[in-house]
Image: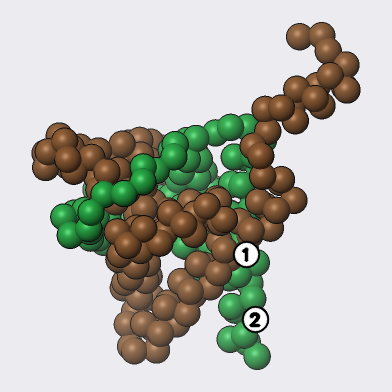
Amino acid sequence: MNISNQEYGELAKRHSPPSSMYKTIPMAFVIGGGICTLGEALLNLYEYLGMGKTNAGALTSMTLIFLSALFTGLKLYDRLAQCGGAGTLVPITGFANAMVSPALDFKSEGFVLGLGAKMFSIAGPVIVYGISASVLYGIIYYIVILFMGGL
Amino acid sequence: MDTFMEYVWAFLVGGALCAVGQVLIDLTKLTPARILTTYVVAGVILGAVGLYEPLVDFAGGGATVPLTGFGYLLSKGVREAVLEHGLIGAFTGGFTSAAAGIAAAIFFGLIAALIFKSGSKINE
């Protein structure tokens, strides 16, 4: 496409979201950073209570997921997402929200094909590609240590 | 003071990872599903090449709470399982390490969906 910078600017402006990036990006930074800081606090709390690093990490994720499910149910998470943008999407709470929200909305279509299936409309692809990438890595890693004789 | 800096780094690194996501949303029109998928796969790759581990040591929750941390967890689980069990570990390691998170999301998600009434739809 052959257009001048000015034309492109106008085109881009017309297709941009209404909210300015000068606002959305700092908001994502602050709210996302805040959720991660809460995670860090939970991590320290569970380690302080005598848990190992792995279990403390798992329990931190579970706590954040629980809170996200609760706040999604109370409609508070979506309200936070309106100003937090990616700050509420990228943390693990966003993953949980992406499961609970459609499950809740499609409950009326039945407990199996509504709630049960729609829960994975966003989480499904994430798991498909995440697990597949990790399996691929595992196979490559296995071949590497096979030839290099146990790292 | 060390503890304080730990929180500062968790905030800054976690915030930065989210800001990158926001830049992607604003500039590329990537849907939330694509962003989450990209982050998890990126986490697996960064974990595989050994770049994510130092970030986790440095930023704690700032690196583990974002979805890239989930990908890192998958790669770490696979690596440990391959070392312990051989090739089958490539298939068992990912889910094993992510089990708590995935089971919690499914279970708490189900409970929340059963208890609460539906409201506005999530915008994709």
The quarter holding residue A16 reads top right
The quarter holding residue A121 reads top left
Can you identify the residue that label 2 sits on?
A: B5
Residue at disc 1, secondary structure: helix
Q: Residue at x 33, y 88 (%)?
A: A50
Q: Are marks 1 and 2 on the same chain?
A: no
A81 shown above or below B24: below
Look at discs 1 and 2 and give the one toward the viewer.
Answer: 1
Q: How is the image coloured?
A: by chain
Query: Viewer-proximal residue, B64 or A96?
Result: A96
Q: Position of residue B106 (x, y in %)?
A: 22, 53
Q: Position of residue A46 (x, y in %)?
A: 36, 82
Q: Position of residue A104 (x, y in %)?
A: 25, 48
Q: Residue at x 34, y 67 (%)?
A: A67
Label 2 amino acid? Answer: Met
Q: Which circle marks residue A20 in the picture?
A: none
Which chain identifier belongs to the brown chain?
Answer: A
Indicate left or right for A5 with A86 as reference.
Answer: right
Q: Residue at x 63, y 32 (%)?
A: B28
Residue B19 appears in the picture as rendered: yes
Can you identify the residue that label 1 sits on?
A: A30
Label 1 amino acid? Answer: Val
Indicate left or right for A32 with A149 as reference.
Answer: right
Colour that chain B carries in the picture = green
